[in-house]
Structure formats: C-alpha cells, structure tokens
Amino acid sequence: MKNYIKIILSILSIINIYIITNCSNRTIHDNNNIINYFIHNKGEVCPFGVLCGKIMLILGLIQIIFLIKDNYNIIKNYNIIFLILGILFSFMNYYVLLNIIPAFILQLLIIII
C-alpha cells in the first residue's frame, strides 16, 4: 500500500516539474552562446532550467520503475542527492524556486515514508 502512495506522489511531482520547466514561459536566445544558456527574464525559465527539468523527469520515471518493482531502497540515497541538487539549482531562478516547492515536498515525502 505504501508503494502506491509513493508512486502517486512521484507522478504528481513529475507533473509539477514538467509544467514549471517545460510548459511555462521560456527565454529563447537566437545564438548558442553558453552565457545565454543561463540568462532568463523574470518569470521565465532559461534553457538550462528546461534541460534540468527534462533530466528530472527522466529520473522521476526511473524512480517510479523502482517503486513499482519494490526496489526503492536501492536508489533512495541517490534520490536524496538529486533532491538537494534540485533545490540548489532552483535558487538560480526565483520563479522556478517558488513554483517547484510542491515537487520538493512530494519528493521529501517519498524519501521519508
């Protein structure tokens, strides 16, 4: 029963991350200068944030697979590390930080439960 709750929490977390990083306003630059990769307008997500969001989506899907197979303890420590990295990277963009807090809370619940 606990794994079903964790799977639902993980799905909700993935949806939140997808909406914030891939469906919200994005800053698009014409040239591929590495500096422009991190520049964003207020209330928008930079290309680096979009890439990190896609990586977190893939990691979330891997997390669901481990939860379904009841092997979550194998990746639990990695999940803690990725959660800390996600929180740190989100400080680069205040808009993302505020809107992605529910995903962080859901991931923390998955770790604790």
Image: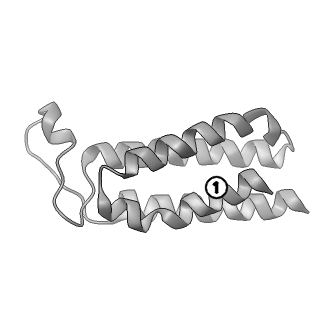
Q: Residue at x 79, y 33 (%)?
A: 74
Spot the residue most to the left: 31
In the rendered image, residue 40, in percent from the top left (x then y), is placed at 18, 53
The quadrant of the rendering that contains the C terminus is bottom right
Query: Which residue lies at the image location 20% right of the left edge and 40% below the top edge?
Result: 37
How many tags in the picture? 1
Q: Residue 19 location, x and y as percent?
A: 43, 65
Residue receiving disc 1: 107
Query: Type of residue at label 1?
Result: Gln
Q: Is 22 on the left-hand or right-hand side of 62?
A: left
Left or right: residue 105 versus residue 97 is: right
Give me the residue at 48% from left, 40% from top. Answer: 85
Could you tell me which quadrant the N terminus lies in? bottom right
Relative vertical location of residue 75 with respect to residue 1 in this rendering, above or below: above
Q: How is the image coloured?
A: one colour
Q: Is residue 70 left or right of residue 52?
A: right
Please name whichever residue, 29 or 46, is drawn nearer the observer in this view of the structure: 46
Rendered residue at 24%/67% (across/down): 43
Residue 100 or 23: which is nearer the viewer? 100
Q: Position of residue 22 (x, y in %)?
A: 37, 58
Q: Could you tell me if residue 42 is visible in this image?
A: yes
Q: Is residue 38 above or below residue 108?
A: above
Mark 1, secondary structure of its residue: helix
Q: Quadrant of residue 8?
A: bottom right
